[in-house]
Amino acid sequence: MNAPTQIQAAHCPYCGNILFQNLKRHKVRGCLTCKRPIVIARSPFGRPRLYRIYSILDVGMAVYALLTIALIAFFLLSGHGVGGFVKGFSIALFIVGSVLCVDGVLALRTARDKTWGRQRRGVAARSVGGGKIAAGVLALFMVFVGVAI
C-alpha cells in the first residue's frame, strides 16, 4: 500500500551525468562534470510544478533559429532591401559565434563535447572544440563585416 517510490535524479542535458546541486535555489548553474551552463525553468506546457533543465547553449541556438526564420519572413513580406537583411542577419549571427566559442573553449577545458547528439571525449573532443572556436571566430568576424556594410 505505502510502497516506497524511487525519486529520479536530475541529469545534465549535455553530458547526462547526475546533477547534485540544489537546482531550485539557483536558476542558472554549471554542470560539475562538463561545466556547461544549465538553467532550470518551468515547463511551458503541463503541470505548473513541472520543471525542465535546459542547456543555455542549446537555448541560444534555438533562439538563433527562430530569429533567423522571423527575419527571413519579415524581409520576404515587407520587401526591404538586401542591406537591412544583411545587418539583421549579422546581428543574429552574433549568437551563433558566441555559442560556438563558449562551447569550443569548454570542450578544450573539459575534454567533453556533444555535437549533433554524439558525445566525444578526450582528444576527439578537444579537436572538435578547436574547430568550434575557429568557426565561432569566423562567425564573429562575419558579424563585424555585416554591420560595416
Image (spheres, rainbow, N blue to C red):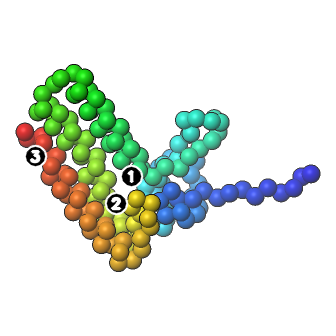
Disc 3 secondary structure class: helix
Q: Position of residue 15 (x, y in %)?
A: 49, 64
Mark 1 = which residue?
A: 57
Q: Earlier in the sequence, mark 3 or mark 2?
A: 2
> In the rendered image, which quarter is residue 50 located in?
top right
Q: Residue 109: which disc? A: none
Earlier sequence position, callout 3 versus callout 1: 1
Q: Which amino acid, mark 3?
A: Val
Name which residue lies at 45% across and 52% down: 55
Q: As shown in the figure, which amino acid type bears the numbered disc 2?
A: Asp
Report x, y in % for residue 138: 18, 56
How packed mark 2 is, by other alpha carbons closer than 10 Å (few <14, some 14-19, many 20 or more), is many
**Residue drawn at the location 35% of the way across and 78% of the way down:** 123
The disc placed on residue 145 is: 3
Q: Residue at left 43%, top 55%?
A: 37
Q: 87 left or right of 52?
A: left
Q: Is residue 109 visible?
A: no
- Residue 9 left/right relative to 127: right
Say if 29 sits above or below 69 in the image: below
**Residue type at tag 1:** Leu
Give left or right: position of 21 versus 7: left
Residue 67 occupies quadrant: top left
Which disc number belongs to residue 103? Answer: 2
